[in-house]
Amino acid sequence: MEPRKRFILEERDIPRRWYNIVADMPQKPRPALDPVTRQPLTQKDLSRIFSEEAARQELNTVDRWIEIPEAVRDQYRLYRSTPLVRAYGLEKALDTPAHIYFKNESVSPVGSHKLNSALAQAYYCKQEGLTNITTETGAGQWGTALAYAANVFGLELAVYMVKLSYEQKPYRRSLMQVWGAQVVASPSMSTKAGRRILTETPNHQGSLGTAISEAVELATTVPGCKYTLGSVLNHVTLHQTVIGLEAEKQMEMAGEWPDVVIGCFGGGSNFGGISYPFMRHCLGGEHAGTRFVAAEPEACPKLTKGQFMYDYGDEAGYTPLLPMYSLGHTFTPAGIHAGGLRYHGAGTIASCLLGEGRIEAVDIGQKESFRAGVLFARTEGIVPAPESAHAIAATVREAIRAREEGTPRTILFCLSGHGMVDMAAYDRYLTGDM
């Protein structure tokens, strides 16, 4: 077997700016609309929910590069750059001519890529003079990251965690509480939205749509409190581009360029984070043959089976109307273990790119994803999060296709997080109880 190759950047090479792909898109995404007036949202509208700076970044369609605040970059230095690794073990197991690389975001203090945006959003809220923030979380990775970031910047945090994940993933809940967050199972009786949902469906197991409704309601009714989001919106994906910007330099160190870039897809933040810095070269006329593949769950296939529409980002209809591929804001997916991918809609940037044919999407069944996750753990030594296992499954498909067609290709995927607090899910897979 080839010696393992890991590519790490020097501290000076950690990105100083995030990349805003909207500035380079020939066709911009349609604007988000006010749910009452149906007029395009303004910064003033958004800043009622989000921090002022997040609202500015969300609507920025002009500036390609946005400076990373030094206080945020200081925190990035604790775990960035994350390694780029050549997956020789996986290549051998698949007997493929493909070269497989993965960007390992699981090495962050919270075990996932989510910290890249959590630190930025918490910092902006602190700079604005806020004392409290709130959010939703599916599998708990975003809630965990924001709990860590809120603790770093001295903010109080309330997390509405999808009830199914609250019960399936108690250690995610514990991690949030260790860092000082208050965690509530959603839907709950603590908000009007939660009470309405439980009245209509008493045994509702929750969805990201229900949890967002409760978090937004809290943010708009409590003084000194703003809402923060872990995926979907443009400013979140912007912060995640540190992943792809580093990977671009690391692929150059490896002497290769990806033919295929893959990320799992819930709302689009880690997929956009790994993909968009590479896509800017395609938009500029270089590397036109690079493909970008979003791997979503079969149980929540908004990209492969959804419709493009203006839809709410939450179940109660508190959020702006977003132009996106969606299964409908009242859609409640099956209780798969990849809780972070159980979201009904796709981000506006990814939706626009999918409509133009610039990205592809595949849906992955739960058993196929866990099969790929176990194979990766046995060949590369890392137990992946159930969400990340979808990207691995899509990678396995590409590698097998390369073998069957006899066409070598270079594949890059984002290992968005580890699964060391998701072992109950692996137990169910290994015992055949899935």
Image (spheres, grey):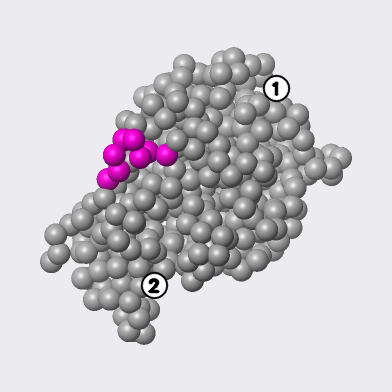
Q: Is residue 220 visible?
A: yes
Residue at image coords 46%, 16%: 154
Dot 1 falls on a residue whose secondary structure is helix
> Vertically, is 130 above or below 288?
above
The question of residue 14 being in magenta is answered with: yes
In this rendering, position of residue 389 left or right of residue 10: right
The image quadrant where one finds the C terminus is bottom left
Q: Is residue 385 visible?
A: no
Rendered location of residue 429, percent (x, y): 32, 59
Residue at image coords 31%, 35%: 11
Magenta residues, as a range?
A: 8-15
Residue at image coords 14%, 59%: 3
Disc 1 target residue: 221
Residue at the farthest bottom position: 405
Disc 2 target residue: 398
Query: As rendered, which of 277 and 243 lies closer to the eye?
Result: 277
